[in-house]
Image (spheres, rainbow, N blue to C red):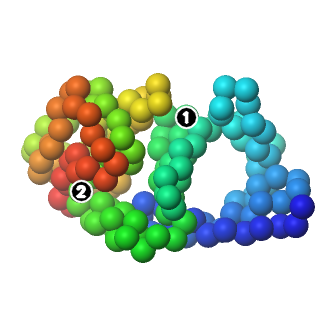
Amino acid sequence: MSERTILLRDAFGGEHRVALTAEGVRVEGSLVRAEPQPNGAVRMDNGQAAHLAWTAISDDTRWVFIDGDVFVFDTGRPSARRWRASAAQGSLAAPMPATVRQVVVSPGARVQQGDVLLVLEAMKMELPVRAPGDGTVTAVKCRQGDLVQAGQELIELEP
């Protein structure tokens, strides 16, 4: 297998080079071995720690679920880049179709980067939606039990 490199853009505009090689996956220079599991997960092992990851794909968008965190990557569609840029600038949108299991914050709440704002459920997994930075919640646009679609605005934050 020859090496194949792809560029992924995260929800905050960061770019990550990922090389697919015969020996594993090289992310920003670090080798990670990826081993498919019978339950649909992929066991990721960098030699120091192992994690189970699940992925979902829609067009040029990739969702990766690892240890309760959701990572959204755009592999090139311009409209997806615009949507992610607006999400990072003040609103948080659903990364995929899901059910709102719990809303943790309310308008006026001060949050810090990494705080859980709400919990979604998709593909039988709980997906915490975390604050991308410090700020104040200005609006909550969903309720527990709501079915939400990918891209649907859930929470507005103000720095």
Q: As drawn, is 72 to the left or to the right of 33? A: left
**In which quadrant is the C terminus drawn?**
bottom left
Q: As drawn, is 151 to the left or to the right of 24? A: left
Is residue 112 among what the camera can see? no
Quarter of the figure with residue 108: top left
Q: Residue at label 1?
A: 67
Residue at (42% x, 32% y) in the render: 122
Mark 2 falls on what kind of element?
Answer: strand
Q: Residues within 10 Å of mark 2 (few under 14, many from 20)?
A: many
Q: As drawn, is 21 to the left or to the right of 128? A: right
Callouts 2 and 1 close, C-beta under 8 Å: no
Q: Does residue 18 sit above or below 52 in this rendering?
A: below
Is residue 75 among what the camera can see? yes
Residue 130 x/y as whole percent = 35, 44
Residue at (18% x, 58% y) in the render: 158
Which amino acid type corresponds to the residue marked 1 in the rendered image? Asp
Q: Does residue 101 sit above or below 33 in this rendering?
A: above
Viewer-closest of 147 and 34: 147
Residue at (37% x, 70% y) in the render: 79
Residue at (17% x, 32% y) in the render: 143
Residue 72 x/y as whole percent = 47, 53
Quarter of the figure with residue 6: bottom right
Which amino acid type corresponds to the residue marked 2 in the rendered image? Ser
Residue 59 x/y as whole percent = 50, 58
Q: Earlier in the sequence, mark 2 or mark 1?
A: 1
Residue 150 x/y as whole percent = 34, 48
Q: Which mark is residue 91?
A: 2
Instruction: Measure how far apart labels 2 and 1 are at the Cα level.
Output: 24 Å
Q: Does residue 141 sit above or below 125 in this rendering?
A: below
Mark 1 falls on what kind of element?
Answer: loop
Q: Residues within 10 Å of mark 1 (few under 14, many from 20)?
A: few
